[in-house]
Image: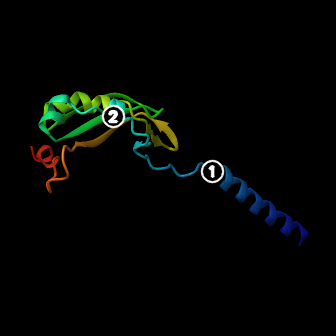
Amino acid sequence: MRLRIALACCVVLAGLVAVAQAPSAPRAKTEARYAGGFRPDACRWPREARQKQISACCQMDLEIDASGFVVRGEGECTDPMFLEPTLRCLSAQQFIPATHNGRPVSDIQHLEYEWRATTPPGRDLCNTLKTS
């Protein structure tokens, strides 16, 4: 009887050890996210657009490295004069990097960035880019 109890305890203990050492299920990949801390000195409105009260939307693809910094970016804007200021602005921001299996990785992140000269006009500025 004692031998059966001892064997049963060994089997249970071996099972617990095996479960503890088994690799966990792979965690889902996450996307990079804006970390906050807006830097307005890097996000200056294009002078001509400010004078004419022009608004624009830019759809950007940013490569964000494992440290959370933009290393490359490209995109298109409803008004081309906003592309360079948008790249400069987003490159100055910090992001929480994407992860894969819990580790930070470099990843491409798609963002929409709006420049509004006035209060929202009731239309989506980015819709023009989405349908073209």
Tell me which residue sits at (42%, 31%) in the image.
69
Q: Name the residue under label 2.
A: 90
Q: Quadrant of residue 117?
A: top left
Q: Quadrant of the N terminus?
A: bottom right
Tell me which residue sits at (45%, 50%) in the image.
28
Tell me which residue sits at (77%, 59%) in the image.
13
Disc 1 marks a residue whose amino acid type is: Ala
Please give left or right for residue 33 compared with residue 52 in the image: right
Q: Quadrant of residue 70?
A: top left
Q: Is residue 124 above or below residue 49?
A: below
For label 2, the SS is: helix
Residue 53 place in picture, x, y as percent: 14, 40
N-terminal label among 1 and 2: 1
Residue 37 place in picture, x, y as percent: 44, 40
Disc 2 marks a residue whose amino acid type is: Leu
User: Which of label 1 and label 2 is nearer to you?
Assistant: 2
Q: In which quarter of the image is the C terminus?
A: top left
Q: In this view, does 47 lie above or below 22?
A: above
Residue 73 place in picture, x, y as percent: 29, 30
Please give left or right for residue 110 compared with residue 31 in the image: left
Please give left or right for residue 129 compared with residue 1 in the image: left
